[in-house]
Image: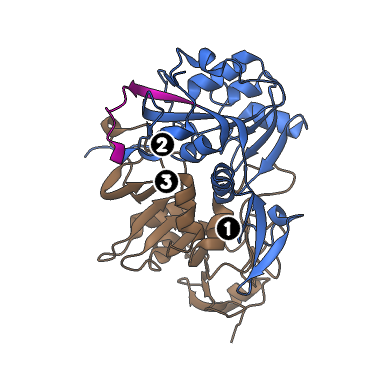
Amino acid sequence: MTQRTGWTRDDMARRAAQELKDGFYVNLGIGIPTLVANHIPDGVDVTLQSENGMLGMGPFPYPDEVDPDLINAGKQTITELRRSSYFNSAESFAMIRGGHIDISILGAMEISEGGDIANWMIPGKMVKGMGGAMDLVAGVKRCVAVMDHTNKAGASKFLPQCTLPLTGRDCIDMVITDLGVFSRGEGEGRFRVTELAPGVEMDEVKAKTEADLRWG
Amino acid sequence: MGKVYKNAADALEGLTFDGMTVMSGGFGLCDIPENLIAALRDSGAQNITAISNNAGVDGFGLGLLLEPRQIKKMISSYVGENKEFERQFLAGELELEFNPQGTMAERIRAGGAGIPGFYTKTGYGTVIAEGKPTREFDGETYIMETGLKADVSLVKAWRGDTQGNLQFAKTARNFNPMMATAGKVTVVEVDELVEVGELDPNTIHTPGIFVQRIIEAKCEKRIENMTVRERN
């Protein structure tokens, strides 16, 4: 029997949740980042922002609580909390673009060694649009990208340069993949390997990473 | 001349024409001006430029205008919940201009506030920045975006009074208040139309100065992505 190594989607979400600090205002993207809400550490109180115009996003409603006027940015029905507030889209993006949101956790298709992110379009396919992703990566204080380290064909998604059209340039502070955690501090160019997922060896990370990291 | 009209068709009378630019509020299907969109379709106006965060779904919302090919160009941040939209776009029959959602909201806000352009970091270094002037502020590069205006803005609100003062419900506010400011003529449909004095002036989200025509109309309020949890 082979032992599975590395992190599952849920493990990655749990690890990303460790980046949330008490009192943070947080924006979570669609996909794995949405799962982060299930793993907020005990004793850490955060407020979730939904960019369609709500702070203090509550859980999904019970069937008899559904309100068509109350949805999140993924258009899912949600509920409010005692702390919630509502506002228009311009005010919502003033929070995002004005640097008032502490952290954004978002999915990625590719990340470059210089912190560029591509996550909104694949040329030749029907493009749905960037929604709020370009605003989030340009404006939020700290951006954490969560993605599988390689694509289905086994090719690295952590690259010297993104091959897909960019969502933002030099904006990602931390990358969490199924293999580990990669981070860079303020003003640092390249990422360091700061954590390996259980059972993952550095050699495997090196073999699956095209980006030039600070390996030492 | 009062602001209150009988119905959606009546409220759009004399406002629609070929080549017009229309803003339409809502986020996904959440509080879109359903009745006014249907009336715009019935007006037969062609070659419309539609500014709306999303493009509706097949047969509902702006989807109603896509099927009879009344839309020439969409300015949106996220589309593609709509097969007819995709078909027309891939066939080259529909122009599409993507705006980052925050840039779009700010462009509309600016348009309504008499601000012709502004600088933002959003989109710098991406295809969105191509051809746009840039400027450095405190060592960071920003791109210039322009304000957006419309010939007619279609807005959906929860409650309004006969003077056009509006209140929105929860996340149904979204783009509606900015669009109300950016239309040469702003037409609003509300769930509940009341007499002046019935809304607390301290709780008005959009002052009536931005509203020229208002109707009360019943909405279907379709839910795009029903997500619930079970009681234990």
- Image quarter in which the C terminus of chain A is found: bottom right
Q: Which range is magenta? A: B187-202
Q: Which residue is mark 3?
A: A53
Q: Are marks 2 and 1 on the same chain?
A: no
Q: Is residue A146 visible to the viewer in this orientation of the structure?
A: no
Q: On the picture, is A83 further left or further right than A52?
A: left
**Coordinates of residue B48 in the picture (x, y in percent):** 68, 27
Label 3 neighbourhood size at 10 Å, few (<14), some (14-19), many (20+)? many
Residue B120: quadrant of the picture: bottom right
Q: Secondary structure at mark 3?
A: loop
Please state the horizontal and vertical placement of residue B155, each as a whole percent of the image.
49, 30
Q: For the residue marked with disc 3, what is the amino acid?
A: Gly
Q: Residue at x 34, y 57 (%)?
A: A47
**Residue at 66% of width from left, 15% of height from top?**
B44
Q: Which residue appears farthest toward the bottom when viewing the image?
A: A216
Q: Nearer the viewer, mark 1 or mark 3?
A: 3
Chain letter, brown in picture: A
**Label pair 1/3, CB-CB below 8 angstroms:** no
Question: Residue B45 occupies which quadrant of the picture?
Answer: top right
Relative image position of residue A133 (x, y in whole percent): 56, 53
Task: Nearest to the eye among marks 2 and 1: give it.
Answer: 2
Estimate the spatial distance between the alpha carbons at disc 2 and disc 1, rounded to whole Å.
41 Å
Residue at the disc numbered 2 = B207
Q: Earlier in the sequence, mark 1 or mark 3?
A: 3
